[in-house]
Structures are given as structure tokens and as C-alpha cells.
Amino acid sequence: MTPSSQGSGAPAPCALLVVGIGELATPRGDGPLGGAALGRVDRARGQAVACDGDRILAVGPEPELRARFAANEVLDASGGLVIPGLVDAHTHPVFLGTREGEFEQRIAGRSYVEIAAAGGGIRSSLRGVRGADEAALVAALLPRLDRFLALGTTTIEAKTGYGLTVADELKGLDVIAKADRHHAVDLVATCLGGHDVPPEFEGRASDWVEVVAKELWPAAASKATFADVFTESHVFGLDDSRRLMESARDVGLELRMHVDQLTALGGAQLAAELGARSADHLEHVTPEGIRALAERGVQPVLCPLVPLYLGESQEAPARAMVDAGLAPALSTDFNPGSCYCMSLFEVMSWGALRYGFSADEALTAATLNAAASLGLGSDRGSIEPGKRADLVITDLTSAAHLTYELGRSPVRAVVKDGRVAWRG
Ligand code: NIG
Ligand code: FE
């Protein structure tokens, strides 16, 4: 008997049956969903989800699934909302030490670029990573993954970028691989060799660009899925960024890019020209930049907490992007400098408050669209048979509460790869 067969006969075995679901809310398909489809979320009551191995076997009315399956374990959602495991498509979690002093300076009026020019910012995190061995960095990363999981995030894109020597960047990628093996949360590795100009290369950014192009990317290609660059006039301009990204593509790395975050440099147009998987930040993107992204189907990865955190007034024009048909992801940009927050629930709320996203739009952006931006849309990001069994059980009564409530985690339990990986 196959698990999908119905009617008479003995119930099929399955590892986990999630019952007692109030509302089940999920986007559908492989995504990414752009334009009007961004808000196309299925909401249904009285559903159950059967899981086996790391996959979703069936989704349907609870009485039907109870009859069809004999489950080893039954998880009662106690009437709560169930959504897909959240996917954070932009994080910088490999670092040692925090930078709360810079936060205080910004509150007192100094800008992110001023602090960076005075030796703070990304460079202050370099000291921690360069001085630490792999074990120390893994030990710092694992508790962060615990927190991501407790907040309902089951997959993160994880960037290096605080090493900025060839050896320290490769060490960062090894840290990500080790943490991925040892933790339920899945990590997708990005080598951010273009995060900043290392102090040793001060005034010679193009020399570092050549080191990255000729030495780092070839060595990173077997350890990372993506390469990334901070395209900004005080870091890597358009020519250096193009050289970095073309050389990464040449060795088989896919591209994500930090663009138009602090100024309208035209990074979005470059990301489109290069066929990047994602163009991230985009607070200062121009209408031409939006058009270029739309023409090439590049996904925006939006980080609404970052301008808030940096004291910058300019928001990403998210609604204009959606109106142009783009399929945004929402992410934390978790890092020690410009956003020390791991909660995608918080980010969804700010997506509503700052961009005018509906709860359904925010949910798609933090699940299926984020997964699609990582090339994983056919594997995860929605609750459908055949997809990876990553689910968040909340204590919310409906998806409308996803963006409505601030400052408290609604997560009751998290299912990762078909197993209950976290319980509140
Ligand atoms: O995404 N834009 C550059 N990188 C990070 C900030 C990193 C840091 O300040 O440590 C970002 O905002
Ligand atoms: Fe970032």
C-alpha cells in the first residue's frame, strides 16, 4: 500500500503526524512568487500534516489523515497556526564578539560609514575571526543556530566575510560546513570575499580583488554555493565588483550581491547584467535598477531592520519592486554591526510596517521566495507533499497575526527534516 492510497486497508506507517492545527498557511509551488502572486497564500483550517523521513507525505483534513496513517509520533499544535519553516536568505553569522559600542555611537549620531572609516565596522570583526581557530568559531556559531531554530528559522544562508585573507575566508567556510553537519538548521554557504578591503590592502582595493579572483574563489568553489560582494563606493565600486563577480562565476559560484544599500551606485543594474541570484538591500535602488532586475528575474532580498538599525531614513521601495513583478525575500541580515536580530517574525512585522506588505506577502517572502533565492524552491519553503518536512507550530490563531504582534516569539515547536527539533 502506498502512503497516498486511501480507503480500506491498514493505515500506512509514518514517522510524524501533526494534528490539532488551527490554521495552516502556506504559499504553493516552487516559486519565486512575484507581483500579485506574492500574496497568494493558502489558508485552511482543520488540516493535518503527515511526515516521513525528511519529507512531507500528505496534507489534508485531519480525520482523513488520521485514518490513512499510523504515526510513530503525534504532535498536537493545540489549535495554533502552522507555517513552513522560515528561510533566512541573508545572514553573516560567523564572527566572534559583538559591537554594541558602535550601536551606542550610532544612537549618539555617528554614521555607519564614519565608524567604519575610524577602524570600526567590518574591520573590527576581522580581528575576532582572524584570531580564532575553527573550533572557537563553531562554538560561537552553534548557539546562534539554536536561537534561529527557536525563532522558527530552519534554513539560513550564511556568509563569511570577517576573515578577508584567503586562509581566514576558507576557515569561515569550513566553520559553516561543520555547523551544518552538527545542527538541525541547514546552512547554505556564501563566500563574502568582497565584504571589505582588508586593512593590509588599504588604498589598493584592486590588489585584493585580484587575490580574491585568482586565489580565493577557486579554492572556495568546492566549499560554497555563492559568492558575494559589498558594492558601495567606499568599498568596491562597479568595476571592482564586476571583476569579483565575473571571476566567481567563472569558477562555478552563483552570485548574490549587496547593492544600492547606502547610495544609488547602480549595483542593481550590475546584478542584473551579471545574472545574480539575488540583489540584496536596495534601499537606494532607482527605477532603472528595478526595471533591470525585473528584466532578468533577479530576486530582491530585503532587510527592513537594517536602515532602522543604522539610523538611515531611506527605505527600500519594496512596493514598487512588487508592482514591477519582482519576487522579494525578507531577511534579517543578522550580523554584529548593522542588525543584531535573528527573528524573521520581527522582520515580517517590519516588512508590513515599512513596506506595506500584507501578512500573506510577508509569509511568502520569508519562506518560499527566500528558498527560491537560494535555489531551493523545489525542496522547501511551502507545506506540500514531497517538500522537506520543515514546519513551525505557533500559538497564533491565524496568519493575520504573523505581522500584527511585535516583540514576542509565537513559536511553540519546530519540525525540521520530519523530526521535532525544538519545543517551547
Ligand atoms: O549587510 N553591508 C555590509 N555588510 C553587512 C554589515 C556588516 C557589518 O557591519 O559587520 C550588512 O549590512
Ligand atoms: Fe549583509
Image (spheres, helix red, strand yellow):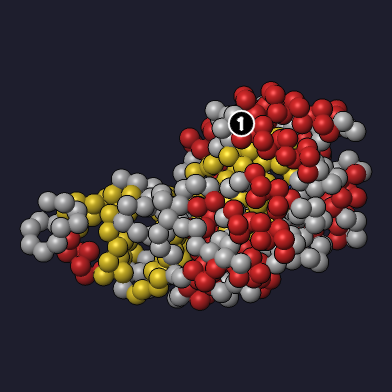
Give x and y (percent) for residue 420. Answer: 39, 52
Write the residue at 10% across / 56% down. 10
- Would you say residue 331 is visible in this rendering? no
Q: For the residue labelled by badge 1, is the local secondary structure a helix, a strand or a loop? A: helix
Q: Name the residue under label 1.
A: 250
Numbered disc total = 1
257 sits left or right of 115 in the view: left
401 sits left or right of 420 in the view: right
User: Observer-nearest residue: 173 or 322?
Assistant: 322
Amino acid type, label 1? Asp
Write the residue at 76% across / 49% down. 337
Q: How crowded is mark 1: few (under 14 residues within 10 Å), some or many (20 or more)?
A: few
Write the residue at 62% across / 25% down. 218
Write the residue at 44% across / 64% down. 27
Residue 104 sits in quarter: bottom right
Q: In this view, does 180 lie above or below 84?
A: above
90 sits left or right of 392 in the view: right
Give x and y (percent) for residue 383. Answer: 38, 60
